[in-house]
């Protein structure tokens, strides 16, 4: 499988995966989409709270050593 992951653009690969009629592949694609959407939603809500002046969130991010806090600092 690794050589196949380098063929075409990500948009093309996604198109090809959508054409595969196996339920397992389609379920996996749905799970990946859900995880992506949830992660984007979490990051956006943290950034909005940070921009809005939420002091508790600012302190948490300033002290945070986790990936989410580091990304929010950028």
Image (tube, rainbow, N blue to C red):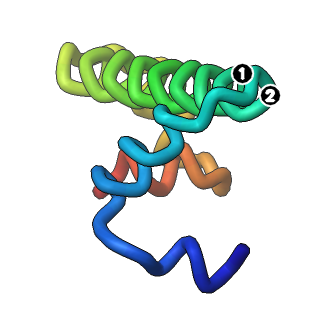
Q: How many marks?
A: 2
SS under mark 2: helix
Residue at 45% x, 22% y is 37
Q: Marks 2 and 1: in contact by CB < 8 Å?
A: yes
Residue 10 percent location from the top left of the image: 35, 58
Q: Quadrant of the N terminus?
A: bottom right
Tag shown at residue 27: 1
Of residues 40 and 74, the one drawn nearer to the viewer in this rendering: 40
Q: In the rendered view, tell whether residue 73 sits above or below residue 58.
A: below
Relative placement, left or right, of 73 versus 19 is: left
Which residue is labeled 2 in the image? 24
Q: Marks 1 and 2, how far apart in space?
A: 5 Å
Q: Quadrant of the C terminus?
A: bottom left
Using a 10 Å C-alpha cutoff, classify the residue at mark 1 as few (fewer than 14 neighbours), some (14 to 19) or many (20 or more): few
Residue at 34% x, 15% y is 54
Residue 65 percent location from the top left of the image: 65, 56
């Amino acid at each position: 499988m690794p050589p196949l992951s380098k063929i075409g653009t990500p948009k093309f690969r996604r198109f090809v995966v959508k054409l595969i009629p196996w339920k397992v592949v389609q379920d996996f694609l749905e799970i990946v989409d859900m995880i992506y959407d949830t992660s984007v939603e979490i990051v956006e809500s943290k950034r909005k709270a940070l921009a809005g002046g939420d002091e508790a969130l600012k302190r948490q991010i300033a002290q945070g050593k986790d990936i989410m806090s580091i990304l929010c600092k950028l």
